[in-house]
Amino acid sequence: MSSHTDSTRARRRQFLKLSSMFTAMGALPLLQMSQAARAAEPDAPLRIGYLPITDATPLLVAHHNNLFQEQGLQVEKPRMFRSWAQIVEAFLAGQVNAVHLLSPMTVWARYGSKSPAKVVAWNHMSGSGLTVQHDIDSIEDLGGTTVAIPFWYSLHNVVLQHLLRSKGLESISDGAPTRKQVKLVVMAPSDMVPALANKQIAGYIVAEPFNASAEVLKIGKILRFTGDVWKDHACCVVLMHEQDLQQRPEWTQKVVNGVVQAQAWIQENREETARILSKDNPQRYTPHSYEALAQVLQPELLDTQLYESSGAIVNTDWKEKRIDFQPYPFPSYTEELIVKLKETLVLGRNEFLAELDPAFVARDLVDDRFVRKAIEQAGGPGKFGLTSFTRKESITV
C-alpha cells in the first residue's frame, strides 16, 4: 500500500476523531476529565498548547521573554502539538489551559461541543497564504485539482472557497473533481510541503512559515496572501477555559497581559522574534529555519514588487504586512466570520451553524474585558496602530 494512501487514511481518522470531539456527546468524557483535573488542581500553572506555526508567536515570545513570570505566574514550558486534533483534545481535557486555535474552530468548540471556552484575544493578523505549483498562475487554473486545507473550520477554508466561488469553481470533498470543481483535503501543515513537492496536491492554503518554506525550497510559489483578501483578518485566537475567567479573573488578566505585552514587543523586535522561534534557539519552540521565519516576520524582507507583479498582492493600498500583531478581537470580524461560515462547505457535524446569530456569537464567544485592560496597560490602542475598538471588515477577491 502506498504511503500516500496511508497518510490519507490517517488524516481521515484524525478528522473523524476531531469531529466526534466537537459534538456535545463526544466532548463529554473530555470535559469530565477537565472538571476532575480542575478539582484536583484549582491553582494550576499556566499550561500553553501550540502548533509550530507563526500563529503561536505571542504565546511563545511571552514565555521566552519571561513576560508571564514577571506577572507572577507559574508557567510550564509550552507543549508543542502536531495536529489540531491533538491540541483540541488536550484543551478540552484540561491538560492545557491557554491555546491558540483557528478562529472558526472556537465557534465549533463552543457551539458544537458545548465546551465552556472563551476567546480572550487575537494572537495575530494575516500570516497565511495560498501556495501552488509553479505552473498555476490563477485561481481558475485550480479547476480539476486538489488543494489542501489545515481544517474545515479554518479561515483558510473560508477564504479559499470565497476565492473559488468568485471564479465559478465549486468546492467538493469526495471523488474526482471536474474542470469546474476543486477537491479540498484536510492535511496537517507539516505534511503540506512534502505533498506539494511530490505533486500529490496542486496547492495548499495555510499559516506561515509553510508558504515561505515552499519559496525557500523552490517547490512552489504564493498565488495569494489571505491578508490581501480579508484585510487584517484574525487567523488564530487565544482560547481559555470559561471557568478560569470566572474563578481566577486575576490569573486570567495576567495571562492576557503577557500575551499583549509580547505583541507590543514583537512590533519592535521582528528579527529577534524570528530567532526566538527558529530551530537554532535552545528552547526549540519550532523546527523551522531562521531564513523561512525571517521572510514572514520581518516586513523589510517582503518583496512587495515581486508579489504585486505576480498578483499575490492585489490590494496595494492596504499596505498589509505578511504577518502582524494586534490583540483586540473586533466584534465585526466575529460577525462576518459567522456569515461566511454559513456559506462555506464544512464537513462534520455542522447543523448548529444555521442557528447561530452573528451578533450573539460576537458577544458570547468573546470576552474582551481582559484584553481591553491589558491594551491600556501596554500603552493604549495607539501602541498597536488602533484608533478605536470598532472597524468595518474589508473582503475582496
Image (cartoon, grey):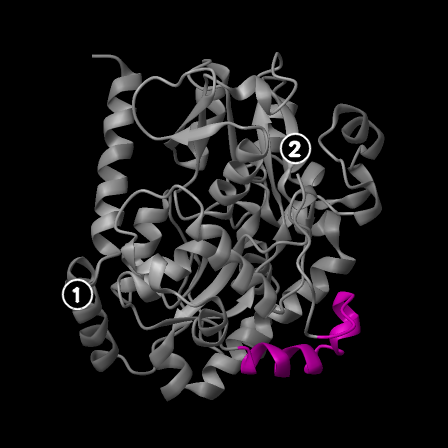
- Give the labeled residue for mark 2: 224
Residue 43, disc:
none
Residue at 48% in and 87% down: 250
Q: Nearer the viewer, residue 357 or 197?
A: 357
Q: Nearer the viewer, residue 95 or 351?
A: 351
- Disc 1 and disc 2 in contact, CB within 8 angstroms: no
Q: Residues within 10 Å of mark 1 (few under 14, many from 20)?
A: some
* Rendered view: 27 above or below 207: below
Q: Position of residue 40 (x, y in %)?
A: 21, 79
Residue 211 seen in the current view: yes
Q: Secondary structure at mark 1?
A: helix
Residue at 44% in and 23% down: 181
Residue at 27% in and 68% down: 114
The amino acid marked with disc number 2 is Arg
Q: Main secondary structure of the magenta part?
A: helix
Q: Determine whether, in the image, residue 83 is placed left or right of residue 10.
A: right
Q: Residue furthest front?
A: 168
Q: Position of residue 344 (x, y in %)?
A: 44, 44
Q: Which residues are magenta?
A: 368-388
**Quadrant (top left/top right/bottom left/bottom right) for the N terminus:** top left
Separation (CA) of disc 1 from disc 2: 40 Å
**Quadrant (top left/top right/bottom left/bottom right) for the C terminus:** top right
- Give the labeled residue for mark 1: 28
Q: Secondary structure at mark 2?
A: strand
* Rendered view: 224 above or below 320: above
Q: Position of residue 50 (x, y in %)?
A: 44, 53
